[in-house]
Image (spheres, helix red, strand yellow):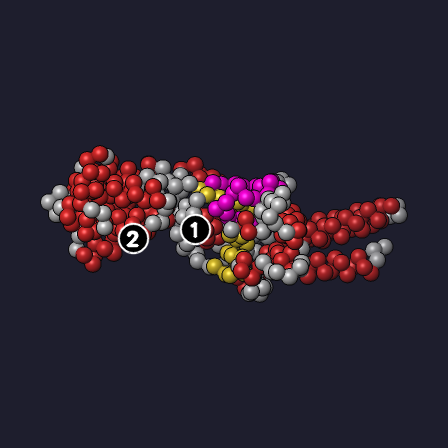
Amino acid sequence: MPTVENFIDIFDALSRKDWNDVKAVADNIYESERKKKHYNAATRIKEAADIAINNNLISDTFVMSEHSLSAPPIDLLERFNDINAEKPVLPKWMNNELALYFREWNMFKELKLQDIKPRNTLLLHGLPGCGKTMLAKHIASEMKRELYTVRFDSLISSYLGETGENIRKIFSFLKTNNCILFLDEIDAIAKLRDDKSELGELKRVVISLLQNIDNLPEDRILIAATNHAHMLDPAIWRRFDVVWELVPPKDNVRDNLLETELGESYTSSEYKKEILELTAGMTGADLNRTINESKRRRLIEKTDLIESFLLSTIENARRGDSNQSTNEGRLIQAIKCLKLAYKKKYTYSKLEDITGISHSTIHHKIKSS
């Protein structure tokens, strides 16, 4: 018969709703009873454990009441809960993959009955501003799950072993709550283990992270994001079922966004092609910020929307959001568009006042371009 320790272990796992541990304890008891030739008892124990696990996993995992959430380690996690989170600008293929992902989780019961595990680990990588955090929030709102972002300022500790313990705490919270855990800037704890500049403690942190991902229940979701994919340990990549690279939107995506946001003033402009070229290389965040600023500028300065958009683009390029060569090229292209579309209003002297670039330089650059 099972020992007292077996009962304590299984009750402990049940109290934490850790179905992986329940299965592990039940499997140990099953093997122990079989060795004793208690075949009937072994089979009954295994069947009872399977029923208990399946009944809980097949419960509706797509929608879950927030009242079932236990208190998170508030110093390690920050809660996000927005049922209408904005969707980032995505290419068509990623929109299709995202729709497939949502259908996959809507069919959780059917997949489970076929012994198929849904993809529950996602890694998002790409340039800053391409929408990684926005996409994580959108996924959470679509799946009606709360999103908890890891606070790395609290997670990483200078004390030996404490960072690994903090990682265990956040994954323990995820195991017992039907939410989504978001590890933004995962490279902070998942760097290459052959990096000679890192201490042994940080290498142990990577191992701790790998072990916790491996023990993630199949009905829980982990999303990670990084701007520095090249820094990640190869073992980290293998732990993620879905890997999506977010890149600046292509011409057709930007064109559709500009048509939607700027409307007739953009679609009917004879300089539509030049304006589209101006936005090349802009991230979704760059575009959305410029569009929002142009709408605000139009109301305040009483300019038309295209004019406001070009002036906002000039301001952002002067501010230096991108690298220097990109900023300079975008600045000249915006000046060129402004001069073409509003020739009489924007003299070279006025453009000098707006941009801080001498009128002779502006004249030369526009002519040469």
Residue 259 shows up from this direction: no
Q: How many marks?
A: 2
Query: Which residue ends up furthest to the top in the rendered image?
Result: 368
In this picture, which residue range is highlighted in magenta?
219-245
Q: Position of residue 305 (x, y in %)?
A: 21, 49
Give how far apart the Cα atoms at labels 1 and 2 are.
17 Å
Q: Is residue 211 left or right of residue 188?
A: right
As displayed, is residue 161 above or below residue 280? below
Residue 278 shows up from this direction: yes
The numbered disc on residue 292 is: 2
Q: Residues within 10 Å of mark 1 (few under 14, many from 20)?
A: some
Q: Position of residue 226 (x, y in %)?
A: 50, 47
Q: Position of residue 9 (x, y in %)?
A: 76, 58
Quarter of the image for the C terminus: give it: top left
Q: Is residue 122 within the magenta segment?
A: no
Of residues 250 and 45, the one nearer the viewer is 250
Q: Is residue 221 within the magenta segment?
A: yes
For badge 1, the amino acid type reads Met
Instruction: Please tell me which residue is depicted at 61% across the width and 49% down the height of the picture.
Output: 198
For numbered disc 1, what is the local secondary structure?
A: helix
According to the image, label 1 marks what residue? 134
Q: Residues within 10 Å of mark 2 (few under 14, many from 20)?
A: few
Instruction: Please tell me which residue is depicted at 53% across the width and 45% down the height of the picture.
Output: 123
Quarter of the image for the N terminus: give it: bottom right
Instruction: Please tell me which residue is depicted at 55% across the width and 65% down the height of the picture.
Output: 74
Instruction: Please tell me which residue is depicted at 40% across the width and 48% down the height of the picture.
Output: 129
For numbered disc 2, what is the local secondary structure?
A: helix
Of mark 1 and mark 2, the one earlier in the sequence is: 1
Query: Image quadrant of residue 15?
Result: bottom right
